[in-house]
Amino acid sequence: MTDFIKTNWAKTEFSQNYLEKADIYIVERRRMFSILRSFVSHFLSSSGNKRLLDLGCGDGILTEELLQVDGSLSATLLDGSDDMLAKARRRLVKFGEFRYVKASFQELLEKDFLAEKYDLAVSSMAIHHLTLNEKVMLFNKIRALLKDGGYFVNIDVVLPPTEALDQWYMKLWQEWMDNKKSSLGLEDEPSENIIKRYKDLGENRPDTLEDQLRALNELGFSEVDCFYKYGIFTIFGGKR
Ligand SMILES: C[S@@+](CC[C@H](N)C(=O)[O-])C[C@H]1O[C@@H](n2cnc3c(N)ncnc32)[C@H](O)[C@@H]1O
């Protein structure tokens, strides 16, 4: 099983670089957050105290986005990195008290330290580090952690189904990064290098959208769909 401590995310300089450049690296990141906010305000009534689980929370940006839709959310944020959790705490302190859990997805699969049931489980740009088998086990665990009627929404990169589509999606990605950098007037390493690094890094293990949607359906989720897609960047999920 993938060992979090051996990944780049366990290194401060790697995670810091991601946090500084995420709006450049991730195509339409802010739009994806706004689609997630819309999803939540449409499907989860803000009455009552709703429980949110943010998996691979990083610096807590996704939870912050959702607190803007429903300030009464009680959130549990999980990440394998102490450093990221400390940043999430700092970001969210103004919203109140939340639960911060230092654990890898692998530990979450092995142990039952989350006793609560959640109305919503979200994740952004984290689950693609798992193998397909691990992803399926995690989706199953998420289903078990959701209340009946609860939702899982995952923002993540996926594997293109063919080589031809892969080539086009990489071009789309490169164009996005080049435009973003020039609009910010930013000198940065060439976008081709960023794409090459993403592809070469063994810890990036994207699987096709089709495989992941099938897995959600087979695990018994309903309302399974891709809610947004731009090249390899997607939002997908379902309802328990
Ligand atoms: C690309 S960052 C995304 C952070 C945040 N969700 C966002 O959208 O900005 C990936 C996050 O997932 C965490 N992560 C990666 N693999 C993990 C694993 N196996 N278990 C737990 N956390 C993991 C990393 O520490 C990092 O904070």
Image (spheres, rainbow, N blue to C red):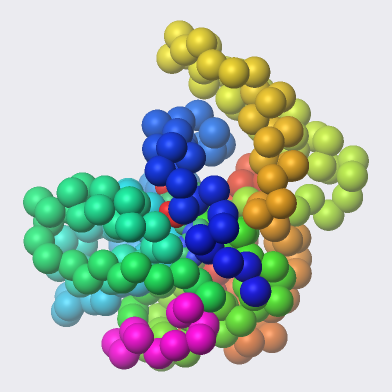
Is residue 222 shown above or below 97? below
Depth order, front residue of 39/141: 141
- Residue shown at 52% from the left, 83% from the top: 109
Work out whether residue 64 can be spotted: no
Question: Residue most toward the front?
Answer: 6
Residue appearing at x 16%, y 79% in the figure:
48
Q: Nearer the viewer, residue 92 or 119?
A: 92
| Relative image position of residue 6 (x, y in whole percent) | 57, 58
Toward which corner of the image does residue 235 lie, by quadrant? bottom right
Asked if residue 56 is among those painted magenta in the image, a careful observer would answer no
Name the dominant secondary structure of the magenta segment. loop
Residues in magenta, as a range = 107-116
> Is residue 5 found left or right of 34 in the rendered image?
right
Residue 109 is one of the magenta-drawn residues: yes
Q: Classify residue 12 by image quadrant.
A: top left
In the picture, the quarter occupied by the N terminus is bottom right
Q: Residue 222's image quarter?
A: bottom right
- Horizontally, residue 132 falls left or right of residue 121, namely right
Q: In the rendered view, would you say 10 is above or below 153?
A: above
Is 225 left, or right, of 12 in this rendering? right
Up-down relation of residue 207 to residue 179 (above or below): below
Residue sitting at 89 percent across and 44 percent down? 163
